[in-house]
Amino acid sequence: MYRSIVAMALIAMIASYFRIQAASVACEAGELSTCVEDLDITELSVSGTIDVRDFKFINEELHNLVSINLGNAFVAGYECSADECYFGKSGEFPAGELPGMCFFGKRYSSVVLPEGLKSIGEYSMAGCDKLHSIIIPSTVTEINEHAFNGSGIEELHLSGNLEMIGKGAFAGCRSLQVVDIGETSDCVIEDDAFARCVALEQVTMGGNVVSIGNGAFKGCNSLKTLKVEDGSGLAMIGDEAFMDTQLTETPFAGCSQLLRVGSWAFANASLNELSLPSCMSNVPEGVFFGNNESSTMIIPDNATNIDKFAFYGCSAINSFSIPNGMACIGDNAFESMSGLDKIVSYAKTVPELGSDVFYGINQPAVRLYVNDGLVNDYNLAEQWNLFEIMGLSNVSMTSADVVACDVRAYFDGDMLEITADTEMIRVTVVDISGIVVADVHLFDCQANVVVPNRNPSIFAARIELSNGVSHTMKLIKR
């Protein structure tokens, strides 16, 4: 009987102990300390109104908290008196702002942020490496510098009024695997925002992400999938933005406003196709450096220069075309492209070269097709003259090539009719002088392209297939 009474008492004590580990309180701004009776609680839910004084109380007094729910609380503004200072700051703390540094380094596992919150202060949850779950309300417009740097967040879903993800905001979040930036206001992702998130595998961006800063996803070496909404307003990708990732595709074909891609943006990635928006006039420095698994390379039609190291080490590329406006190619731009066997240059003049542009390539074994009238000029130009040079009128496909790729083309009057067993994504036709006379984007196994008369009526057609293969064939219009 005695043992039974002791056991029941012990159970009651344990139950009582665990009951007091969670607290749910309603309070007015600055009064939270009077509402929480037990400083040893592990879970706290707050409703009503709070301000920076209450965040200080939570930070300095509730050392055992692992879960905090502020979803039903509103953050009021507070004006410090002359002798007040909170989290290293004095003056005014605006309404709707989570104070900077307020939960820095805490060991919370889950946090629900206040309703109506507009701004998340810098370093507010940095170093919270146990923080696996975070609910950010759709009212938030800005997540400031390093707000969650080094935290333990595993998934991140953002939408609503978001306008800015600040510098380093989620950098070094080593457990973060999925980032979903849904429909937002025009949103800027600032420098290093997700840098070194080594477990990050998938990123989805809505159409209102307008810029991606320098190094934004640099060092996310598990990142394989990036989805960007068609018709996106994305206008800028910064330097080193996706450097050292495992991206296999760049989903920017539908980003008609993308005008700038930074230097080294996709260096050491794993892209299947090396391509940039056709409107770009230059290929940036080191942009595809070290992409040694890529089999297809497309230089933008409007490109006039290629900066140094742009395609360094892209050893799986066996052929590519140079557009007709190309004027200058920088140092080491094509170095170590050891798989190369053909270049087709539509340039109207011989492009100027920097140093060691083709270093590491067995140039005598590579065929270089150029405008017929420029053959002698290429043969006299240093570096170019090491290729096997011939005129574009010699560009053709053997019968074996035609059978292998199952592409057929013929003229019916002014109409060039093309069929392929694999869907085509682009057909570009140039005349013998290198002028583009037709450039059609499609996704079909059949294409009808109007080709105006030229004298002589000799053309080269470049056909890009959806499987990443591209072919160039000589065509004579009779």
Image (cartoon, rainbow, N blue to C red):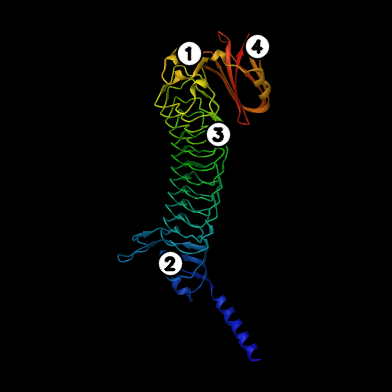
For the residue pair 135 and 463, the one nearer the viewer reads as 463
Q: Looking at the picture, which amino acid does disc 2 mark?
A: Asn
Side of 158 where 409 appears, left or right: right
Crowding at dot 4, Cα within 10 Å, few <14 / some 14-19 / many 20+, comes out as few
Tell which circle, 2 or 1, labels the residue nearer the N-terminal end: 2
Q: Looking at the picture, which amino acid does disc 3 mark?
A: Ser
Q: Is residue 154 above or below residue 263?
A: below
Crowding at dot 2, Cα within 10 Å, few <14 / some 14-19 / many 20+, comes out as some
Crowding at dot 3, Cα within 10 Å, few <14 / some 14-19 / many 20+, comes out as many
Q: Secondary structure at mark 4?
A: loop
Q: Looking at the picture, which amino acid does disc 1 mark?
A: Val
Measured as percent of width and height from the top left, residue 218 is found at: 47, 44
Tell which circle, 2 or 3, labels the residue nearer the N-terminal end: 2
Q: Residue at coordinates 55% horizontally, 55% vertically from top-left?
A: 154
Could you give the CA–CA distance between mark 2 and mark 3, rounded to whole angstroms? Answer: 51 Å
Q: Check disc 2 and report the residue beneath it.
A: 59
Q: Residue at coordinates 44% horizontally, 24% vertically from top-left?
A: 304
Q: Secondary structure at mark 2?
A: helix
Q: Check disc 1 and report the residue beneath it.
A: 375
Could you give the CA–CA distance between mark 1 and mark 4, rounded to whole angstroms? Answer: 30 Å
Circles 4 and 3: CB distance less than 8 Å? no
